Image (spheres, rainbow, N blue to C red):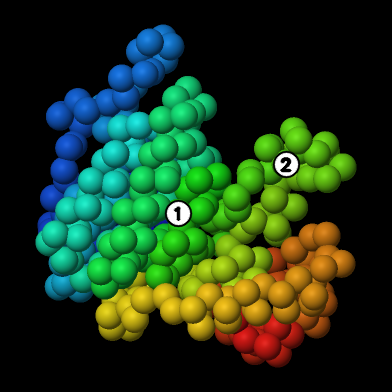
Amino acid sequence: MADSFFEISARERLQGLVDEGSFTEWLPPQARVSSPHMPLLDQPVAFDDGVVIGKALLNGQPVYLAAQEGDFLGGAVGEVHGAKITAMIRKAMIDKPVAVLLVFESGGVRLHEANAGLVAVSEIMRALLQARAAGIRFIGLVGGAAGCFGGTGLISRCCDTLIMSEEGRLSMSGPEVIETVHGVEEFDSRDRALVWRVTGGKNRYILGEVDALVADQVAAFRQAAIAALQQGKPAGLTLQDIEAEHAMLTRRLATFEQCNDGAEIWQQLGMGDINTLAMMPAAEFAAQFAKARDKAMGGV
């Protein structure tokens, strides 16, 4: 499992993504910068508050990075956690690296410090969009066990490029939240196959929410990130871009409005047996579905 992006820690992901020996961490655990709220609730702390930030080289080019640690509170965002990511982005606006890489693994805002976490998410999004407007490319990567949900899901969709493995999960509301609010009839969070068919990388790729679908390998994520760097300086969002996105979403809703499951979307595209597709390697799946997706939704 050493090469599995899903299985390793946040630091191991960053070290595997970037050029060997180039990563420098800011505010590492020995700095002991942790949440001031958790001890007041008799809760344990992490000395990095569940997020790793720093700088490195990617294919010889300078990048800034942040990776959430799913093993601490599911990577949930608290005050210090969010402040570290925001400060890293602010620093990027000054130093102008070629890109910022955000490795997402989070269930959303930390309930123990909910208001502070919500503010932190909004600050990250504001800093990210300001940095994008200044010409800095943002590359998001999703492939951890905790998925990418809640406010973190919103942050991920602000990136220029989003890379995801089949094993990753991406959504605004997590399966347990949907079940709690609307009942098990709406979404059974215990049905793990259903959860991945709906929120997993393959379905998100088909719906046009992910730019690259990769295998659960550190090397695959690294190569996809390098490919994103080679796209050149981002042009920034225009009114035409936003209108095109809205038009795509309208077409997507009209095409799949009656579908209740990711499997139904795949079947409607006419791409064959769902069990075969579910076991298909990421690269083969992406290649097979690209034409069908464009044909069904008029391009995304």
Q: Amino acid at mark 2?
A: Ile
| Cβ–Cβ under 8 Å for marks 2 and 1 | no
Asked which secondary structure carries label 2, the reply is helix
Q: Position of residue 251 (x, y in %)?
A: 73, 79
- SS assignment at label 1: helix
The image position of residue 99, as x and y in percent, is 26, 67
Name the kind of residue labelled 1 in the image.
Answer: Ile
As drawn, which residue projects farthest toward the front?
Answer: 239
CA separation in Å, label 2 and label 1? 20 Å
Q: Which residue does the numbered mark 1 point to in the structure image?
A: 155
Residue count near mark 2 (Cα–Cα under 10 Å), binned few <14, some 14–19, many ≥20: some
Quadrant for residue 60, please give it: bottom left
Q: Residue at x 42, y 45 (%)?
A: 122
Please determine whether, in this image, residue 263 is positioned above or below residue 255.
Answer: above
Indicate left or right for 235 with 246 as reference.
left
Check the image and report above or below for 274 versus 193.
Answer: below
Residue at 48% x, 48% y is: 152
The quarter of the picture where the C terminus appears is: bottom right
* Image-based side of 104 in relation to 67, left or right: right
User: Is residue 19 toward the left or the right of residue 259 in the image?
Assistant: left
Front residue of 8/73: it is 73
Q: Which residue is mark 2?
A: 178
Side of 42 relative to 206 (left or right): left
Question: Which mark is on residue 181?
Answer: none
Mark 2 vs 1, N-terminal side? 1
